[in-house]
Image (cartoon, rainbow, N blue to C red):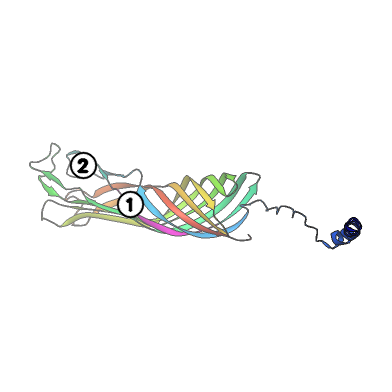
Amino acid sequence: MRVSLFSGVALAALIAAPAMAADMPIYTKAPPVMMAPFSWTGFYVGFNAGYGFSGSNSVTTTGQAAANIAAVADGARPGSISLDRDGFIGGVQIGYNWQFGNIVAGLEADIQYTDMRDSVNGITTLAVAGPNGTPPGTRNNVFNQELDYLGTVRGRLGYAWDRTLLYATGGLAYGGVNNSASFSGPLPAGVTQFTGSRRETEVGYTIGAGIEHAFGGNWSLKAEYLYYDLGDTTIAVNNVLGPAGAGGPGYDSTFRNDGHIVRAGLNYRFGR
């Protein structure tokens, strides 16, 4: 009796098993999600801020006539003096990148305000008349140099490791340059005898390098170094006290307008 009952239960289980299996859900492993490769191609805009400092920082002065040439030779007027311009720099940029494999090429334009300036007083004293006949006395020789703004239009060429881009850059640079000089005579004390200034936009070139990293969404952060050279500016420092014969007509002072920039920037890239 027990054997027959057990056999009946087993037979019922075997008959019901296929029906139960048909009702059970079937689980399959989802295919992996394929992420689109990151691309640097597209427009971007951003802003930057950093620090700028002068490059070749010497100002050279020559005399226009015999008395002025003698004053430089005797040390009454400094033939060469250093100006160490430095200060804050900050502005905005816009650009476009094209990516070909790991190679990224692009164009970028930027413009920024700068606070790069310096002023120095090259005080000279002749206890006795100079060997070339310059009268004795103490003289103030004040030189000023400012970079009011700086803009660039540059190409960029780099190599990308996914979201990190290492690049070189170079192109056109332009900036608002203000240079001036004023020299006092030995008598009367403190009275400016020669003065001159020149404010204008100078054009030159820039080269540099940087690294940029995209860190989510449409944003990327860059660090960059640029050297710029806007050429030389020569200003006439003219006699303003009277006849040109009283101390000579004046001097020519030549300023170097170049420098270095170290800055960071934040970009927003469109089309991601």
Residue linked to disc 1: 86
Front residue of this view, candidates 184 and 35: 35
182 relative to 148 in the view: left or right:
left
Q: Quadrant of residue 195?
A: bottom left
Q: Which residues are magenta?
A: 83-94
Dot 1 falls on a residue whose secondary structure is strand
User: How many labels sit on residues?
Assistant: 2
Of all residues, the one furthest to the left in this rendering is 128
Is disc 1 surrounded by few (<14), some (14 to 19) or many (20+) residues within 10 Å? many
The first of marks 1 and 2 along the sequence is 2
Q: Name the front one of labels 1 and 2.
A: 1
Give the residue type that dot 1 points to. Asp
Percent coordinates x, y for residue 230 in the rendering: 41, 48
Dot 2 falls on a residue whose secondary structure is helix
125 relative to 36 in the view: left or right:
left
Percent coordinates x, y for residue 62 in the rendering: 26, 43
On whether residue 86 falls in the magenta region, the answer is yes
199 relative to 96 in the view: left or right:
left
Look at the picture and state if 97 lies above or below 133.
Answer: below
The answer to whether residue 133 shows anywhere in this view is yes
Front residue of this view, candidates 163 and 18: 18
Q: Main secondary structure of the magenta part?
A: strand
Is disc 2 surrounded by few (<14), some (14 to 19) or many (20+) residues within 10 Å? some
Give the residue type that dot 2 points to. Val
Residue 72 got which mark? 2
> For the point 54% across and 55% down, which residue is it?
215
> For the point 33% across and 52% down, which residue is it?
86
173 relative to 82 in the view: left or right:
right
Percent coordinates x, y for residue 122 in the rendering: 20, 47
Asked if labels 2 and 1 touch by Cβ distance under 8 angstroms, the answer is no
